[in-house]
Amino acid sequence: MTRTIAALVAIFFAVVTAAAAEEGVEDLLPAQCAPGWSMEGKPATYSPQTLYKYIDGEAEMYMPYGFEKAATVRYARKGGKGYGVVASIFRMGSLLDAFGIYASYRGPGVQQAPVGAEGFGDESQLMFYQDRFFVRIEASGASIGDAAVFRSCAAEISKNLPDGREKPQELVLLKVSGAVPLTDRYYPSSLLGYGFFGRGLTAECRLGTEAVKIFVMLFPSPDAAVKALDAYARYLKTSQGGPEAAAGNEGTTLHVNDPLYKGMALARSGRFVVGVAGLKDTAAGDTLVAALRERLPKE
Amino acid sequence: MKRRAESCSMNRRAFLKAGMAGAAAASLGIGSLEGLLHAESGPQPVYRTLGRTGLKVTTLSFGAMLTPEYEVIRAGLDAGINYVDTARRYLNGRSESIVGRAVRGIRDKVYIATKTKPGSNTREAIIADVETSLRGLATDYIDVIQLHNLENPQRAFIPEVREAYADLRKQGKVRFLGVTTHTNQAEVIDGIINDPEKFFDTVLVGYNAKSDPSVKQAIARAKAAGIGVVAMKIQMGGYRKENEPLSPEQAAAAFKWVTRDENVACAIPGMKTLDQVRQMLPLMSANFTGKDRRILKEYAQAIDGYFCRLCAQCEPTCPNGVRISVVNRALMYAEGYREYALAKATFRGAPGARRCSTCAGCVARCVNGIDIGGKMRQAERLFA
């Protein structure tokens, strides 16, 4: 009996979650974002074709993250003297995509906000992601906002989103000793600024006294990983940066002198490539490369 | 406060090295940054004067809005580019930090343009924005501060805004003042031109081969009035034709089309990868040719004829009730944004999409001339 009830509850929440994901993004904006703060007019909605009208050229950044639809509206209270709060919800392609766009705005030293899977905020804005939604709440009409209103607004929106406090599982791939918290990022293409690399994750990391960058490239297949490394090797050859070994060899840690990042150590494991960039001594990156390989799923 | 020596000699030498190598690398089909940086001769760099600011800026300048790695920007600067455009808003301020890191050690050789937030229209907000920008950029002055995203000239005439900008200039925190505009551009530019105080020195404007003639004319009037013109959105949105990415030739033709207009001081294409920097560098001294004209014409036609505006006016003309606009959106996700999973999911959710496979011939018609039958067949091939 207990199992049946649990199963029914699970099904109910699954249905509710799916419904929330499918309904119009504008319907996820609450009528009141905080006590006394009401919606001004109807929410404006934006598609991939029209997002630029809202955030201009910044819209280009959203597309590779599978942007589908956005809704935005301003909240104000009576007698608020022009001060308001603008809340925007962006439906992205996946949880990882929502994290990716969120993390692109998250700078060092942000004050974390306990909402969604992860959030941060200050006196003028609050951002968080939850499921495949990225939410941005900003002050409007004043240089300084009200953090309490932002928090309330975020909580109200969070209630309307599919339940989800979990972060993308891919982020565990960067959890190695020395990784600097809140510096993990996801790029849907051209990792490290190279067109031949695809999507992947990066984070800042301390290696002794050095500040380096760790990365994990996510390829669809081992062949694709080999091809990308071959392209990188050809590029390095023309740049006199090595490598000595065949680039795609499974398990071999390559030490190269990258023109952009200087010393780099990297290795392929199946469809993944892990590495460390910005090394003074490339051999010093071997332990980090090994640690990153340890984090990879066994496939 | 440090002040830049208005000399281009260092950049010119660097560019002389870079440009030729870039051209050589491109012709050999190789991509060597070392080659870019260490060849001994090359095409002449092209500098133009940014209106009454007097700044000599490279015609190829750097749109840093979406560049995630400072190393990529630095590679462009080391190769001779000397003007970088960013904004307080981009990446929530991270873009400015990335630019700040890229110019570390060469600040006096690079001009930095940034923008206050679009919603900052009070003295307090503007000053807070600039102070934050200075910290993010790790510099003690900004070369060009811009009022972001004007949709009409009125915001440029708010007394409080002008006082704040003027005070920042007096304090030496900003050197020159500008505005940016994406919509209603000719009216905004004319408003700045006709300002009796000549308050703003530059305009950043969307300008490309598909721009309305009124924009081109306004740009000419701006130049004549001593206002420096910086062009953005030069690649017409960077749309992709059929299943191919925007080619380097198309990007090159778009850049050359814009910079052949000498009323434009510089263009700021967004460059996110080293490949893009490498492809663009040799174009500074390249001429707009008949071939470029043909490429651009074909490109513009491709955009007109291929990209569905998702108006759905065609859907009543399909006897099988296929949601053609949804199928076309799926194609756009696949071909334009390269998001195949999303594309497939969208196709699966398009009512009637699979009925196309059982239909003998497509009778649906598009008011904009798109070959609907062809696009439905393409969707079948990709997703079914």
Image (cartoon, rainbow, N blue to C red):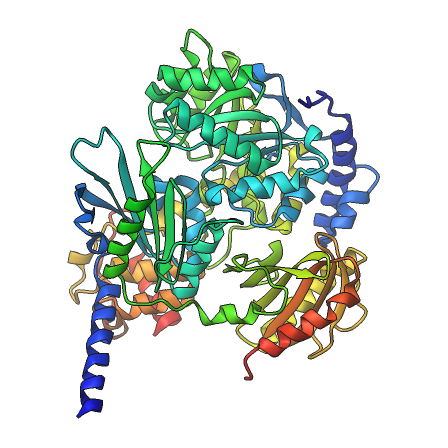
Residue B351 to residue B192: above or below: below
How many numbered circles does the render carry?
0
Which quadrant would the C terminus of chain B be assigned to in this image? bottom left
Is B102 displayed left or right of B327 in the figure?
right
Q: Residue A105 or A55: which is nearer the viewer?
A: A105
Residue B353 appears at what percent x and percent y?
Answer: 25, 69
Residue B359 to residue B120: above or below: below
Is B183 displayed left or right of B205 in the figure?
left
Residue B341 to residue B177: above or below: below
The answer, for residue A29, to whether it is visible in the render is yes
Q: Residue at horizontal 46%, vertical 15%?
A: B221
Q: Which residue reaches farthest front?
A: A148
Q: Residue B328 or A34: which is nearer the viewer?
A: A34
Residue A287 appears at what percent x and percent y?
Answer: 71, 72
The answer, for residue B369, to whether it is visible in the render is no
Q: Which residue reaches farthest right?
A: B40
Instruction: Specify the quadrant of the image occupied by residue A11.
Output: bottom left
Residue B354 appears at what percent x and percent y?
Answer: 26, 72
